[in-house]
Structure formats: C-alpha cells, structure tokens
Amino acid sequence: MAGNDFGGEMRLRLANGDNPTLRAAVTLNTAGLSSEVVTNQNGSNSRVVTLRSRRAELTLEDNGENFDDILRAPRQDIYITEEFTQISHIFGNAIITGDVSNNRANGEVSGLMIDADTYQRLG
C-alpha cells in the first residue's frame, strides 16, 4: 500500500558523480504533454495538446560550480532521491537548461531546469 509521506532531505546526482546541494524543494513536471482549452466562436470547447519535455525546477546552493560547464554538459541521466520516502526520480537523456540567477545575499542559485526525454519514478 502506498503511503502519503512527503518531504525530508532530497539529493541530486549528475552522471559525472557531482552532487550539487539542493536549496529548496524540487518541483517536478513529469508529464510529456500539456493541454489547454480553446473556445470556439460557437461556444464549444476544443483541447490543444502540446508535447513537452519531462522537467524539474531546481534551486541550488552556490558551492562555486561552473554553471557554463553545467549548461554545456552532454546529455545524461540525472537522479533526484527523496531520502525520507525512498523515492527516486530518474530523468533520462537529460540536459540542464535555464538562465542562472545567483543571489549573493543568501547563496541561492535559481533559474535552472532539468529537461529530459524520459522520466521514471522508482519506489
């Protein structure tokens, strides 16, 4: 039976073995599509479906990483593990994208995303 446990420590691991420190909770967008409604002139609704990558929004602690290297890294499998719940999120054939923003007042790095071809949840 699956429980409704959430939270706790989360860890990020890149394919090269690096473990950037997560600062805030990770927001996952794991569906391979999004949908929206458009309303026609006769009042009926249609649905428009758009394919998209599986994605995770990251907020990291600034540990002196070279973000040019991170953004240029080749495709890789990226793992996020929830220590408390023992759930792993695997982003396959993934790249890190975004526009890095570094808050020097608190050491928070935001604006990064994992964008992947595949997503798998284990646990």
Image (tube, rainbow, N blue to C red):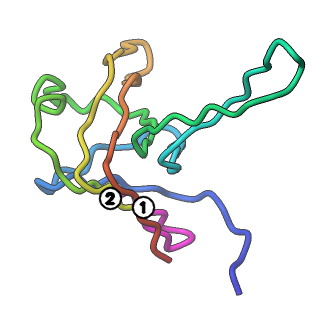
- Which residue lies under the disc numbered 2? 79
Q: Amino acid at mark 1?
A: His
Q: Residue at x 58, y 36 (%)?
A: 49
Q: Residue at x 44, y 42 (%)?
A: 56
Residue at the far right in the pictured view:
43
Q: Residue at x 13, y 27 (%)?
A: 66
Q: Amino acid at mark 2?
A: Tyr
Label 2, secondary structure: give it: strand
Does residue 112 appear to the left or right of 13 in the view shown?
right
> Is label 1 in contact with label 2 (beta carbons under 8 Å)?
yes
Work out whether residue 38 or residue 21 is closer to the camera in this orientation and state it.
Answer: 38
List x then y, in percent, for residue 87: 49, 70
Does residue 92 appear to the left or right of 83 in the view shown?
left
Label 1, secondary structure: give it: strand
> In the rendered image, which quarter contains the N terminus?
bottom right
List x then y, in percent, for residue 32: 47, 47
Which of marks 2 and 1 precedes in the sequence? 2
**Magenta segment: does it hold 116?**
no
Residue at the far bottom in the pictured view:
1
**Magenta segment: does it hold 86?**
yes
List x then y, in percent, for residue 95: 23, 40
- Which residue lies under the disc numbered 1? 89
- Give the residues in magenta: 79-89
Indicate the quadrant where residue 55 lies: top left
For the stretch drawn in magenta, what is the main secondary structure?
strand
